[in-house]
Image (cartoon, rainbow, N blue to C red):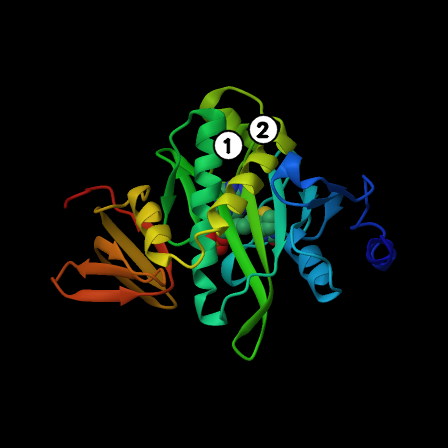
């Protein structure tokens, strides 16, 4: 509580607490969730990270109606107007920092499954961190962490889902659940489903191969013709598989196998392969 009041005082315009933090009993949420709900934040990941540094317990969840500095990977901007589901889960996983990359895939699996169960819409995954339908990008995941030597002090799983925004409020190439299903969704119900599914799947954190198998099974570009851009290099080919660290195996157009661990992937229209 005190921590939050200090956060509020630090930036009164950006950081307004709209609901008293409360711990919801484990039997209702499967985990002892502490849900902190804000009207406006710069980024739920930033607030969750600050709370992590100040010793907040795991399963502290920060949700905001809108974000003024929502972010994706590599300083990409994440459009976060009112109507979407923007939240971050603070975890303190007992894994080595080398295994952190798996959390992003686990969170993507959990989010995909929870949303599909709730909406009946077919949702797929796009490497490395996107949730998509066949018409565009529905959401994304951003995992940030604090590590000491090879241990993880805490990790923040940031999840952004376009929920009830109309098409004209969405960036280019994006879709919302409203647009895809013509139904409006209750934000906290979906949040709860995603947190619940994440908690269930976390039991398997030490089984990276089953996490990656599930991810690959639901991947939209398996095995399609894609283009991947990383820094100033662009390479195209067929995505053949993904390994236990989330590295993509690409069979390039000139039939070499490349292992790609970061980049932005685009599906090519021809879809050979
Ligand atoms: C992501 O980054 O897809 C991860 C996004 C994570 C957002 C959540 S919201 C809660 C938490 N707090 C934060 O500040 N972040 C997390 P990336 O793969 O880098 O994709 C970013 C790209 O997606 C942008 O460059 C745009 O092209 C596109 N984009 C931006 N906003 C979008 C939106 N609302 N819907 C779909 N695409 C979007």
- Which mark is drawn over residue 187? none
Image point (55%, 80%), residue name: 149
Is residue 78 something one can see in this rendering? no
Q: Is residue 215 left or right of residue 118?
A: left
Above or below: residue 98 compared with residue 222: below
- Read off the residue under disc 1: 176
Image point (67%, 51%), residue name: 44
Is residue 99 something one can see in this rendering? yes
Name the spot of residue 174 as percent of width and height, x first.
47, 38
- Read off the residue under disc 2: 164
Q: Is mark 2 within 8 Å of ligand 1?
A: no
Q: From mark 2 to mark 1, how far is it between C-alphas?
A: 6 Å
Residue farthest toward the top in the current orientation of the protein: 182
Q: Is mark 1 within 8 Å of ligand 1?
A: no
**How many numbered callouts?**
2
Residue farthest toward the bottom in the current orientation of the protein: 149
Image point (50%, 32%), residue name: 176
> Tag 2's secondary structure?
loop
Q: Find residue 255 and report its image quarter.
A: bottom left
Q: Nearer the viewer, residue 76 or 15?
A: 15
Give the crowd class for mark 2: few <14, some 14-19, many >=20 residues within 10 Å: many
Q: Are marks 2 and 1 in contact (CB under 8 Å)?
A: yes
């Amino acid at each position: 509580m005190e921590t939050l009041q200090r956060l509020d005082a630090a930036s009164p315009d950006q950081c307004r607490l709209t609901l008293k933090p409360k711990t919801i009993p484990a039997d209702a949420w499967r985990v002892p969730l502490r849900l902190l709900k804000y009207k406006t934040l710069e980024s739920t990941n930033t607030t969750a990270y600050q709370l992590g540094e100040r010793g907040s317990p795991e399963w502290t969840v920060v949700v905001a109606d809108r974000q003024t500095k929502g972010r994706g990977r590599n300083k990409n901007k994440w459009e976060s107007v009112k109507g979407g589901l923007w939240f971050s889960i603070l975890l303190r996983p007992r894994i080595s920092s080398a295994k952190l990359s798996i959390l992003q895939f686990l969170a993507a699996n959990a989010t995909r499954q929870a949303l599909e169960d709730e909406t009946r819409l077919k949702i797929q995954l796009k490497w490395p961190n996107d949730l998509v339908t066949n018409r565009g990008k529905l959401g994304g995941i951003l995992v940030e962490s604090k590590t000491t030597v090879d241990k993880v002090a805490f990790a923040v799983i940031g999840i952004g889902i376009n929920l009830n925004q109309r098409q004209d409020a969405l960036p280019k190439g994006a879709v919302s659940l409203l647009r895809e299903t013509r139904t409006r969704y209750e934000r906290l119900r979906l949040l709860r489903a995603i947190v619940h599914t994440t908690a269930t799947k976390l039991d398997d954190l030490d089984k990276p191969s089953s996490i990656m198998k599930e991810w690959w099974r639901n991947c939209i570009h398996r095995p399609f013709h894609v283009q991947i851009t990383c820094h100033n290099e662009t390479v195209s080919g067929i995505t053949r598989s993904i390994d236990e660290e989330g590295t993509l195996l690409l069979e390039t157009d000139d039939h070499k196998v490349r292992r790609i661990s970061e980049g932005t992937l685009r599906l090519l229209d021809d879809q050979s392969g």
